[in-house]
Amino acid sequence: MNILWERGPSTVQGVVDYLPPGRPLAYTTVQTVLNVLHRKGSVRRKLRGRAYHYEPAVSRLDAASTALRDLTRKLFGGSAEELILAMVKSRQLSRQKLSDLRKLVEDADGRIRK
């Protein structure tokens, strides 16, 4: 998905060619992943000539929101607070990120109270 978001519509070969050098994947593997994403509605495809061109059907933010909601539900019983606490306890958040998060929470709290 990252490649499609960054490059725009691409063929299977286009995705294969854009993969990082340290992460080679077979053409058929990429094709299978794109077909699964198409079946799930995450990508659209159009036949141009003899090859399908795949493009994102969902935004990066929508995909991230769905993945984060699933992760939170599966690992933290649906508790966003537990997710954040786990990130703090495992030192996933720097002091600066914690400060930024604190500001976001304060701003959101201010909007809710109005």
Image: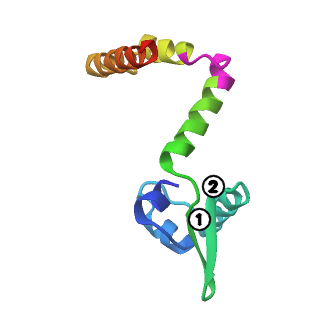
Image height of 74 relative to 64, above or below:
above
Magenta-tinted stretch: 73-80
Which label is found at residue 113? none
- Choose mark 2 or mark 1, whichever is in front: 2
Residue 58: image location, x then y, percent: 57, 53
Q: Secondary structure at mark 1?
A: loop
Image height of 92 relative to 34, above or below:
above
Q: Is residue 94 left or right of residue 11?
A: left
Report which quarter residue 107 is drawn in: top left
In the image, what residue occupies the spot 49% across and 61% down?
A: 4
In the image, what residue occupies the spot 45% across and 69% down?
A: 17
Along the line of sight, which residue is nearer the eye, 78 or 25? 78
Image height of 39 relative to 107, above or below:
below
The type of residue carrying mark 1 is Ala
Q: Main secondary structure of the magenta part?
A: helix
* Residue 41 counted in the magenta span: no
In the image, what residue occupies the spot 49% across and 72% down?
A: 14
Colour setup of the view: rainbow
Q: Secondary structure at mark 2?
A: loop
Within 10 Å of the Cα at label 2, are there few (<14), some (14-19), or many (20+) other Cα atoms? Answer: some
The type of residue carrying mark 2 is Ser
To which residue does mark 2 refer?
42
| Label pair 2/1, CB-CB below 8 angstroms | no
Which label is found at residue 26? 1
